[in-house]
Image (cartoon, rainbow, N blue to C red):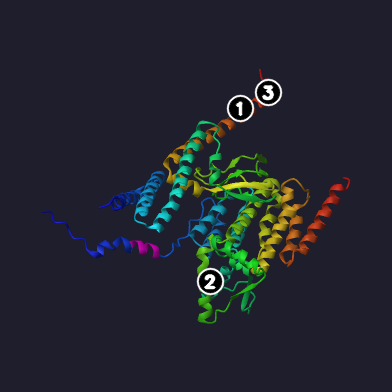
């Protein structure tokens, strides 16, 4: 009779243990390599930005950053300074300002990082609108909740994010909020933010093809977007307005602006601190009027 | 033992065999077939044993399984037919979801990672970089799924509001994995469309060369 070797219980449980330990395995935090072909001056900037993307989200998100910045490698119109500026602003745009970001920045302060310049010194709360908080949830849940808050008329309700890092309760609350980072890329908000970043990159690409002299201004236009909550929404809306009314019509051949970089710089200066968009609209109207007069004027 | 008891016992054995068989199936069509057989046997058994809840459950599952099986068989038939005729991708429409597009909305940007394909139902859409306007009925982005870089090669902008149907690559991949026949014909169709595009590009190139040759002064 053949003796069947006894399999011990410990060995039988091994696959289950492996599966559990695989699930509990700490998140991979190995940064992706810096893309080849970057100018030596750009490499340290990109390295810093890759680390920022890791802190902000994940390795996959850092990979996306590398993929985006690599689009400009080997393009003769992009010098090292401009590439470094794109790298810096791309990291800033990809780290979009949601309530989770507030928690991440405040927790970083606990570990010795400098304070976030967009968080007012001494502020106890930052207010976000209720739809903005719900937009952090996956579409499956948010699509149910958004009609509910609309039914109750709570679209303008404000939700505070507690900024207190002086005690353990405040820190735990911020840690809980920061934990939601893992759902960020599945949130309702993410596709919108992704489209806005892609739009900026697309406009740089179009400027290179149509009006290369304006490319620095298109790159710098990303600086308009800053702040949290209402300020972030307004500055993002200002940026879209600037692109829709000044840059895009020129690239599409529907509008003539002689000195596009100067016009964009003027509109950018108006947009960056405009809390309602009204000043930016007035500036754009003035630019259009001036350009219409210039085109209509007889050549001397 | 009366007839009802015999049916219950024999039916129970067959139902068990079919349930095990259903779980062992790797692809969708045989899984649905065994699912249907299980439903039929359990409807009969539960009728004779007066288990009405079980009967109701399987009476609901039977048409569902039958519909899904029909959908799969129809899909394979349509793809096969498309390979042999006009290379159209219309067969994908039942698996797509509607998306309303506003004027000025961008469906995707150049160099962005491609994740879905679109079927244009109404409205006007333009590939920004090349300036080409796409006609209604056009499929956009079907080759991106098979390309190694998986990136968009142009930007697609809606220039007059309308409706598009969208399906993610993931959904198509699911169909591919669930149904090997579909996968085989889909590959043939995608390759045929690629060759068709290549032939068009070659024809355009030849036409351009011919124009250049006519425009150039004689060298003899």
Tag of residue B19: none
Residue under pointer 2: A177
Could you tell me if the residues under marks 2 and 3 are in contact, i.e. CB atoms within 8 Å?
Answer: no
* Residue drawn at point x = 63 percent, y = 78 percent: A123
* Residue drawn at point x = 84 percent, y = 50 percent: A292
Task: Categorize mark 1 by other alpha carbons within 10 Å: few (<14), some (14-19), many (20+).
Answer: few
Whether residue B49 sits left or right of residue B151 in the image: it is left
**Does residue B114 appear anywhere in the picture?**
no
Q: Which residues are magenta?
A: A18-24
Question: Secondary structure beneath disc 2?
Answer: helix
Whether residue A62 sits left or right of residue A219 in the image: it is left
Tag of residue B214: 3
Residue under pointer 1: B206
Residue A164, image x, y percentages: 57, 79
Question: Secondary structure beneath disc 3?
Answer: helix
Q: CA distance from mark 2 to mark 3?
A: 70 Å
Tell me which chain the residue with mark 1 is part of. Answer: B
């Amino acid at each position: 009779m053949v003796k069947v070797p006894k399999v011990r219980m410990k060995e039988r449980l091994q696959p289950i243990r492996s599966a559990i330990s695989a699930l509990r395995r700490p998140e991979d935090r190995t940064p992706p390599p810096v893309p080849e072909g970057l100018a030596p001056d750009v490499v340290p900037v990109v390295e810093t930005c890759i680390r920022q993307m890791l802190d902000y989200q994940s390795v996959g998100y850092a990979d996306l950053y590398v993929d985006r910045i690599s689009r400009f490698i080997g393009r003769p119109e992009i010098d090292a300074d401009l590439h470094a500026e794109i790298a810096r602003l791309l990291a800033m745009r990809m780290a979009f300002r949601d309530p989770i970001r507030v928690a991440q920045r405040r927790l970083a302060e606990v570990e010795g990082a400098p304070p976030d310049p967009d968080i007012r010194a001494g502020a106890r709360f930052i207010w976000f609108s209720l739809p903005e908080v719900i937009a952090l949830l996956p579409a499956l849940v948010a699509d149910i909740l958004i009609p509910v808050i609309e039914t109750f008329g709570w679209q303008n309700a404000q939700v505070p994010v507690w900024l207190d890092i002086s005690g353990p309760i405040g820190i735990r609350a911020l840690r809980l909020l920061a934990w939601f980072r893992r759902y960020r890329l599945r949130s309702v908000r993410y596709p919108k933010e992704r489209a806005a970043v892609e739009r900026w990159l697309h406009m740089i690409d179009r400027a290179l093809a149509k009006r290369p002299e304006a490319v620095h201004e298109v790159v710098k236009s990303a600086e308009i977007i800053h702040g949290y909550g209402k300020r972030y929404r307004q500055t993002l809306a200002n940026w879209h307005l600037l692109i829709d009314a000044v840059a895009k019509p020129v690239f599409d051949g529907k509008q003539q602006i002689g000195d596009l970089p100067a016009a964009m710089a003027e509109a950018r200066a108006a947009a960056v601190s405009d809390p309602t968009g009204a000043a930016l609209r007035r500036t754009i109207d003035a630019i259009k009027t001036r350009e219409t007069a210039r085109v209509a004027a007889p050549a001397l | 033992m009366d007839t009802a008891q015999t049916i219950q016992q024999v039916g129970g054995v067959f139902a068990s065999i079919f349930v095990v068989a259903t779980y062992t199936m790797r692809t969708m069509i045989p899984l649905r077939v065994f699912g249907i057989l299980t439903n039929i046997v359990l409807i009969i058994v539960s009728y004779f044993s007066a288990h009405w809840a079980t009967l109701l459950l399987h009476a609901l599952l039977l048409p569902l399984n039958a519909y899904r099986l029909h959908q799969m068989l129809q899909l394979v038939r349509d793809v096969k037919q498309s390979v042999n005729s006009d290379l159209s991708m219309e067969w994908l429409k039942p698996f797509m979801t509607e998306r309303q597009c506003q004027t000025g909305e961008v469906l995707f940007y150049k160099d962005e990672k491609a994740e879905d394909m679109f079927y244009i139902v109404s409205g006007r859409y333009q590939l920004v970089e090349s300036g080409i306007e796409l006609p209604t009925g056009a499929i956009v982005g079907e080759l991106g799924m098979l390309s190694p870089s998986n990136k968009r090669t142009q930007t697609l902008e809606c220039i007059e509001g309308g409706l598009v149907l969208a399906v993610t690559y993931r959904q198509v991949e699911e169909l591919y994995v669930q149904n090997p026949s579909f996968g085989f014909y889909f590959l043939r169709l995608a390759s045929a469309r690629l060759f068709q595009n290549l032939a068009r590009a070659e024809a355009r190139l030849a036409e351009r060369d011919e124009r250049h040759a006519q425009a150039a002064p004689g060298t003899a």
